[in-house]
Image (cartoon, rainbow, N blue to C red):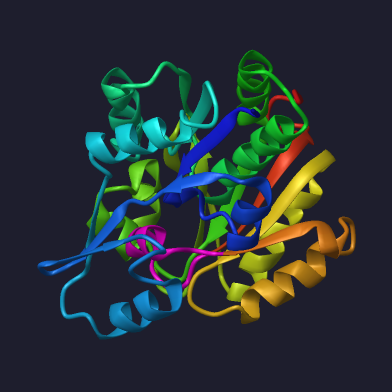
């Protein structure tokens, strides 16, 4: 049987991709008061953003339990003897730690690799997609592991917001804290660097922020995969996709909506592009 590919719900993979590539997604949790919801299962993105707009206090998030991971591993081990697990950055969540510890609880005989992607959202998702495609093509666990480690530094994202208050309140803002000092009419641009949120600039309008995202994607000399992700409204994503389609096939762009866990930490204004490929670093001249 093919290697089983597992990830967490923070990857925000489009549902049709999950189904087509047979990816196992383990959900994190969103908490509104005393109510706990499994990301994307008990609470859809659409309902979540309605709740968020009317919430008096912001929701919180939590990771799956050891037992949930171990149970899923054991279930998969009924059909395969090799499992690859790709998680959100360990600097943003305890998911990697829990997923790793759960391996010791597995009852069935199965080889399991757990990899910290150092990424999140669809930057993580693109790495998972490539791993799942390799698994379906018959790649071994070692071959997929090599591919994942090769792809991780090749997968990046840039995200635009109208506010960073959700990241700040959730404690995930990292070095983007520097952007909080001048937020009036400013659209901050963030990405991930060394597994943490990192500031990459700010723009004076949403239109310029969208152009910033497009320019980032256009800086790639070679693109294997591309994704656009949005939170509250799809309107801006359509504008971004139209720009991107000038140099990358529109029908090959994955379109994702940020789920409840990501929405808790980013808010409804999130818009991002993720690219897996090769680019020349403007600062160093290196690929």
Residue 114 position by quadrant: top left
Q: Position of residue 138 (x, y in %)?
A: 75, 26
* x 43%, y 39%: residue: 88
Residue 108, compared with residue 274, is above or below; it is above
Q: Residue most toward the front?
A: 78
Q: Where is residue 58 in the image (x, y as percent from the top left)?
A: 21, 69
Left or right: 110 in relation to 178: right
Q: Position of residue 41 (x, y in %)?
A: 39, 64
Regarding residue 234, the answer to whether it shows in the image is: yes
Q: Position of residue 95 (x, y in %)?
A: 33, 37
* x 40%, y 73%: residue: 184
Left or right: 16 in relation to 279: left
Residue 230 position by quadrant: bottom right
222 vs 207, nearest the viewer: 222
Regarding residue 117, the answer to whether it shows in the image is: no
Tally the marks.
Answer: 0
100 vs 246, nearest the viewer: 100
Q: In which quarter of the image is the N terminus?
A: top right
* x 65%, y 29%: residue: 2
Residue 72 position by quadrant: top left
Q: Give the range drawn in magenta.
A: 257-270
Residue 259 among magenta residues: yes
Left or right: 117 in relation to 210: left
* x 50%, y 48%: residue: 11
210 vs 285, nearest the viewer: 210
Residue 263 among magenta residues: yes
């Amino acid at each position: 049987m093919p290697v089983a590919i597992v990830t967490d719900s923070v990857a925000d993979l489009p549902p049709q991709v999950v189904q087509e590539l047979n990816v196992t997604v383990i959900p994190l949790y969103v908490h509104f008061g005393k109510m706990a919801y499994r990301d994307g299962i008990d609470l859809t993105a659409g309902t979540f953003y309605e709740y968020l707009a009317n919430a008096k206090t912001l929701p919180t998030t939590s990771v799956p339990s050891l037992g949930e991971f171990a149970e899923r591993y054991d279930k998969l081990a009924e059909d395969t003897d090799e499992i690859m697990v790709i998680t959100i950055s360990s600097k943003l969540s305890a998911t990697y730690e829990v997923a790793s510890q759960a391996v010791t609880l597995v009852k069935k005989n199965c080889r399991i690799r757990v990899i910290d992607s150092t990424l999140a959202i669809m930057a993580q998702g693109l790495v998972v997609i490539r791993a799942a495609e390799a698994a379906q093509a018959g790649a071994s666990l070692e071959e997929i592991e090599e591919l994942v480690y090769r792809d991780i530094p090749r997968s990046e994202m840039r995200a635009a917001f109208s506010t960073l208050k959700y990241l700040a309140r959730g404690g995930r803002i990292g070095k983007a804290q520097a952007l909080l000092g001048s937020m009036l009419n400013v659209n901050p641009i963030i990405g991930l660097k060394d597994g943490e949120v990192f500031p990459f600039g700010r723009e004076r309008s949403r239109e310029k922020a969208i152009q910033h995202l497009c320019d980032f994607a256009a800086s790639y000399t070679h693109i294997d995969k591309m994704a656009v992700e949005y939170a509250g409204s799809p309107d801006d994503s359509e504008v971004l996709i139209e720009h991107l389609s000038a140099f990358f096939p529109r029908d090959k762009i994955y379109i994702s909506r940020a789920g409840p866990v990501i929405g808790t930490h980013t808010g409804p204004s999130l818009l991002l592009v993720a690219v897996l490929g090769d680019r020349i670093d403007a600062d160093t001249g290196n690929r």
